[in-house]
Amino acid sequence: MNKIIELYKKHKEIINYVIVGGLTTVASMAIFYGSTWTFLDGHDPFQLQVANVLSWVGAVLFSYIANRLFVFESKNPKIFKELIAFVSSRLVTLLLDMGTMFLLSSVLHINYNFAKIVAMVLVTVGNYVISKVFVFKKGKE
């Protein structure tokens, strides 16, 4: 048990990021699939992007709070500035998400469910790097 605790302490940030990312993914997917299964048509390119944007907004709000508190443990008193940087960085990865969805689903006609999974993997990696380097900079508050 002590070995597990030591490993957690050594890799706390990345482990917490994976956990928060998993929860963010669940929130995002719930909104995306809830939208496409109830009131939006996932086979219509425009409605597919609407579902994507709705899932993005919900995921970003959840993710900012969880990343600030549990992953990067930000103490930055300039919360609004940090939130703007976070949302801006997520806009960049939203474009990556939307581009991936458009290319795979609308252009290459790959099933949108599979396309969404591919897009989310790319976005997750991009989000971590951007958050670590540009948003939650340690010692730069």
Image (spheres, rainbow, N blue to C red):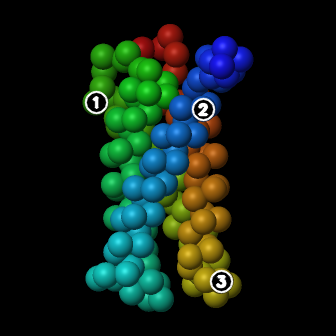
Tell me: 61 left or right of 17.
left
Q: Nearer the viewer, mark 1 or mark 3?
A: 3
Tell me: 108 left or right of 92.
right
Instruction: Pick out the residue farthest to the top.
Output: 139
Indicate which disc residue 15 carries. 2
Q: According to the image, label 1 marks what residue?
A: 80
Look at the image and tell me in which quarter the C terminus lies: top left
Residue 85 visible in the snapshot: no
Q: Nearer the viewer, mark 2 or mark 3?
A: 2
Residue at 50% x, 10% y is 139
Label 1 and label 3: CA atoms lie apart by 39 Å
Rendering coords of residue 70 (x, y %): 44, 27
Residue at 40% x, 35% y is 66
Rendering coords of residue 90 (x, y %): 46, 48
Q: Are marks 2 and 3 in contact (CB under 8 Å)?
A: no
Q: Is residue 115 above or below residue 6?
A: below
Q: Secondary structure at mark 2?
A: helix
Residue at 36% x, 65% y is 31
Decide which of tag 1 and tag 3 comes sooner along the chain: 1
Residue at 66% x, 14% y is 2
Quadrant of the image occupied by residue 54: bottom left
Tell me: 24 left or right of 79.
right
Label 1 and label 2: CA atoms lie apart by 26 Å
Q: Amino acid at mark 2?
A: Ile
Rate crowding at label 2 as few (under 14), some (14 to 19) or many (20 or more) other CA atoms within 10 Å. some
Decide which of tag 2 and tag 3 comes sooner along the chain: 2
Label 2 and label 3: CA atoms lie apart by 32 Å
Decide which of tag 1 and tag 2 comes sooner along the chain: 2
Q: Amino acid at mark 3?
A: Ile
Q: Is residue 119 above or below residue 20?
A: below
Indicate which disc residue 98 carries. none
Q: According to the image, label 3 marks what residue?
A: 110
